[in-house]
Image (tube, rainbow, N blue to C red):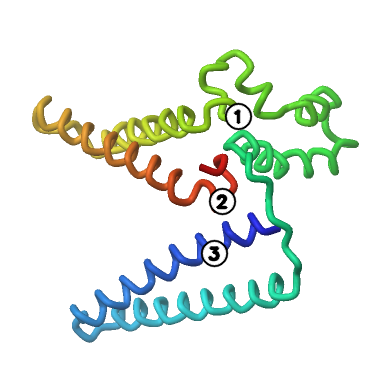
Amino acid sequence: MRLILHGDLVVLGAILATLASDATAVTLHPLPPSYWRNVLLIELALMFLLTVVCVMAMIVVFGRMRLAAPPRNLTPADGIDDLWTLVRIPVTRFSAILPRAVVEWVKRFNSDWLFARVQWLNPRAYPWRFACILGLLVGVSLTVAQLQEGFPPSLMIGLVVAGIFISAEFAATLVGFAILGGYLGLRPSL
């Protein structure tokens, strides 16, 4: 439960930071009066209200709980297994109408099975290596996604933009893993 609380706090912090920057932008550079300006301001206010409601709900839910400290040796593999629970529970509940082979496969699946053939990438044994590969993969994916807007004017510009995307995502992943990984239970304690 403590890790769920930590994850919720990080998400709400990111939302509040985004809303604060939006409110600052609207204050420093107000839009001319129009129907759409009013819609945007109302939406911004409603998002602040929704965020405050979420913070209050967290206080109510977690305020009275005694939260045990999580293990200090968690890795991204444990996070993958936790995410797989979101698949395992509905499949188990609907096992009567699903093919038995699918249900059994979903129940047996875990991160160790997933990375059995690529031990050098196993997040349980090599969490930092896994984070590095994940950062590179996100950077390459972002670069490929940008190609939907069309090809760059030259190969050199394309390589520079790809280098910026890949290196920025790689660095952000590693910095985030270093700063928030232990707090979120995604890496062993330093």
Q: Determine which residue is flagged by label 3.
A: 9
* Vertical order, 113 against 15 (above or below): above
Query: Is 54 on the left or on the right of 168, as rendered?
Result: right
* Vertical order, 53 against 105 (above or below): below
Q: Disc count in the image?
A: 3
Q: Determine which residue is flagged by label 2.
A: 184
| Spot occupied by residue 83 in the image (x, y as percentages of width and height) | 65, 42
Amino acid marked by disc 3: Leu
| Spot occupied by residue 79 in the image (x, y as percentages of width and height) | 62, 41
Q: Determine which residue is flagged by label 1.
A: 124
Rounded to the nearest angstrom, the CA distance separating label 1 from label 3 is: 25 Å
Residue located 42% across and 81% down the image: 45
Amino acid marked by disc 2: Leu
Residue located 46% across and 66% down the image: 13
Q: Are marks 3 and 2 in contact (CB under 8 Å)?
A: no
Secondary structure, mark 1, is loop
Rounded to the nearest angstrom, the CA distance separating label 3 from label 2 is: 10 Å
Residue furthest to the bottom in view is 33
